[in-house]
Image (cartoon, rainbow, N blue to C red):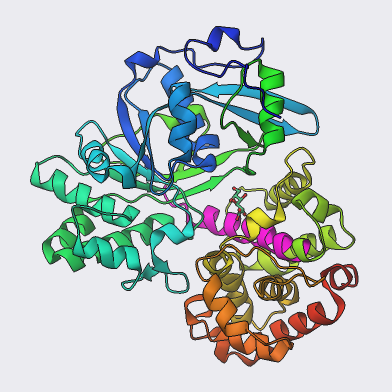
């Protein structure tokens, strides 16, 4: 239980931190806002904000982050009384280490006052607008990755361009204002787990701008940079037990500390016409083309993660590390990676893929993280295409087997029915939950369920539902899951 008499983290309380807790050793009052970040959740605070904190510590104070939440006030309410400071706990089997991060100055809650956020994004000192808004924040159709023009937020933002709700609406309005003011555009930096995330963001932003005004669309297409990035760090949701551990170990309470693993990777396309922090000095890799890294990470890490999440949840495993310890799971993941995913990846010269895959499995086994299968299972409709279905498409083209990938997809289908193997409800979080419910209602057999899901073109496209091989292999996997349950199916592979 949280105590009420404890001292909370703040600038004034920093000297009370326990020895060994790293703190921002730079003058935060000197820091100027150079980056506006949309979607200031746990992932951003464990990843980009940490690299940027190191840049600020190196003496370049132009790159402070102004965070914005597009929906809830939670993060602002937690960080404001702490002067934007928060604790990052890095955990593995060997224990925890702590660092207080100071790169986030202020946090805005967009719906409370869209004009304040638009004004901040129009400031000439802001050179980068970065995003971690999750897949569904792009307001696109997952299968085609193009703007969903019927999305309620998009319809709203087209009708009320100066009072946006969506990230896309904010970006286009801010770019329009900068153009009107003769201020150079910012660089847009997508940090979400999407293939070619810069290109995807460019596609949806440009389309939205065109729908507002053809000239604005052309301006954005020609004048704005959208470098792609590959981001990687596992960040489980923070629990009350984590908060208690932070208070105990650091000596100060934190309303919202961040839990993560030692591993962190950021690969970025070096295309920032208005300048950027010297992130390369603090561990970021800059490359000309990030696509091969992104495909590798999405298919190997996230594809395995989603497979472990659906099958693990159904088999009764609460966390990824529990699932990895379940009979047959580690072997399923290893063979899925080696036999079915690796042959679909572009070759990265000089890169040790074998060591990368081994390290991934080690990360999944990290017992200190307690990363819930339920957390990763969220938003499956938005994740499936880039994590599993595109990989299957490549296998289908080559006439090559994909039974394990198919089992991951079937796991999602079984999970999304909303009832677990003991007949208890599953709390399915997904923008399409209502549609799953309506389509699968009263259906219990594998063929009927398969049919119901495959009608969802926004997930499966028009090609997969027409493929007899896809129907057969996924259908068989689903039938097996329904008959035997996930634990037996995986153990028996
Ligand atoms: C996870 C990712 O929740 C999920 O869907 O697969 O958040 C994963 O932990 C990160 O991409 C790791 O970099």
Q: Is residue 488 depicted above or below 352 in this figure?
A: below
- In this rendering, the count of numbered labels is 0
Q: Position of residue 77 (x, y in %)?
A: 45, 33
Q: Where are the magenta residues, as a range? A: 288-312
Front residue of 428 and 490:
428
Q: Is residue 321 visible?
A: yes
Front residue of 12 and 98:
12
Residue at 57% over, 84% down: 439
Front residue of 414 and 204:
414
Magenta portion: prevailing SS class: helix
Is the C terminus in the top left, top right, bottom left or bottom right quadrant?
Answer: bottom right
Q: Position of residue 159 (x, y in %)?
A: 20, 64
Q: Is residue 430 depicted above or below 78 in this figure?
A: below
Question: Is 289 one of the magenta-colored residues?
Answer: yes
Q: Position of residue 422 (x, y in %)?
A: 82, 70
Q: Is residue 216 depicted above or below 361 in this figure?
A: below
Residue at 20% over, 52% down: 173
Answer with left or right where residue 356 lies relative to residue 273: right
Picture quadrant where residue 129 is located: top left
Answer with left or right where residue 333 lies relative to residue 389: right
Residue at 54% over, 11% down: 14
Answer with left or right where residue 180 lies relative to residue 279: left
Is the N terminus in the top left, top right, bottom left or bottom right quadrant?
Answer: top right
Q: Is residue 201 depicted above or below 25 in this figure?
A: below
């Amino acid at each position: 239980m949280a105590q009420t008499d404890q001292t909370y983290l703040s600038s004034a309380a920093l000297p009370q931190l326990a020895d060994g807790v790293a703190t921002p050793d730079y003058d935060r009052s000197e820091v100027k806002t150079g980056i506006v970040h949309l979607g200031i959740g746990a992932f951003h605070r464990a990843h980009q904000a940490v690299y940027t904190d190191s840049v600020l510590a190196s003496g370049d104070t132009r790159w402070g982050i102004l965070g914005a939440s597009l929906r809830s006030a939670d993060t602002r309410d937690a960080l404001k009384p702490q002067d934007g400071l928060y604790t990052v706990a890095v955990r593995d089997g060997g224990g925890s280490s702590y660092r207080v991060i100071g790169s986030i100055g202020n946090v805005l809650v967009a719906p409370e006052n869209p004009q304040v956020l638009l004004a901040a994004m129009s400031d000439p000192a802001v050179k980068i607008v970065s995003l971690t808004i999750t897949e569904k924040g792009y307001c696109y159709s997952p299968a085609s990755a193009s703007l969903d023009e019927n999305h309620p937020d998009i319809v709203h933002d087209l009708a009320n361009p100066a009072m946006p709700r969506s990230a896309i609406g904010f970006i286009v309005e801010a770019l329009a204002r900068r153009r009107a003011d003769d201020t150079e555009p910012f660089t847009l930096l997508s940090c979400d787990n999407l293939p070619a995330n810069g290109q995807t963001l460019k596609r949806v932003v440009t389309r939205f701008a065109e729908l507002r005004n053809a000239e604005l669309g052309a301006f954005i297409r020609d004048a704005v940079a959208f470098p792609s990035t590959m981001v990687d760090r596992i960040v489980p949701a923070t629990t009350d037990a984590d908060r208690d551990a932070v208070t105990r170990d650091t000596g100060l309470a934190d309303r919202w500390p961040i839990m993560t693993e030692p591993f962190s990777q950021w690969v970025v396309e070096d295309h920032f016409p208005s300048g950027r922090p010297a992130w390369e000095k603090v561990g970021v890799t800059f490359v000309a083309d990030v696509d091969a890294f992104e495909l590798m990470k999405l298919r190997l890490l996230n594809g395995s993660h989603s497979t472990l999440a659906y099958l693990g949840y159904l088999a009764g495993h609460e966390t990824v590390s529990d699932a990895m310890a379940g009979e047959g799971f580690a072997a399923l993941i290893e063979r899925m990676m080696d036999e079915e995913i690796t042959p679909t990846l572009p070759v990265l010269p000089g890169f040790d893929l074998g060591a990368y895959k081994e390290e991934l499995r080690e990360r999944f086994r990290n017992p200190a993280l307690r990363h819930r299968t339920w957390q990763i299972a969220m938003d499956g409709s938005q994740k499936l295409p880039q994590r599993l279905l595109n990989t299957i498409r490549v296998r289908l083209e080559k006439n090559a087997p994909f039974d394990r990938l198919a089992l991951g997809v079937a796991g999602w289908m079984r999970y999304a029915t909303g009832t677990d193997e003991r007949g208890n409800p599953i709390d399915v979080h997904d923008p399409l939950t209502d549609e799953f419910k309506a389509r699968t209602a009263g259906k219990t057999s594998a063929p009927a369920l398969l049919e119901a899901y495959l009608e969802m073109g926004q997930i499966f496209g028009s090609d997969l539902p027409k493929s007899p091989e896809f129907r057969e292999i996924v259908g068989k996997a689903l039938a097996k899951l329904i008959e035997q349950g996930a634990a037996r199916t995986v153990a028996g592979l």
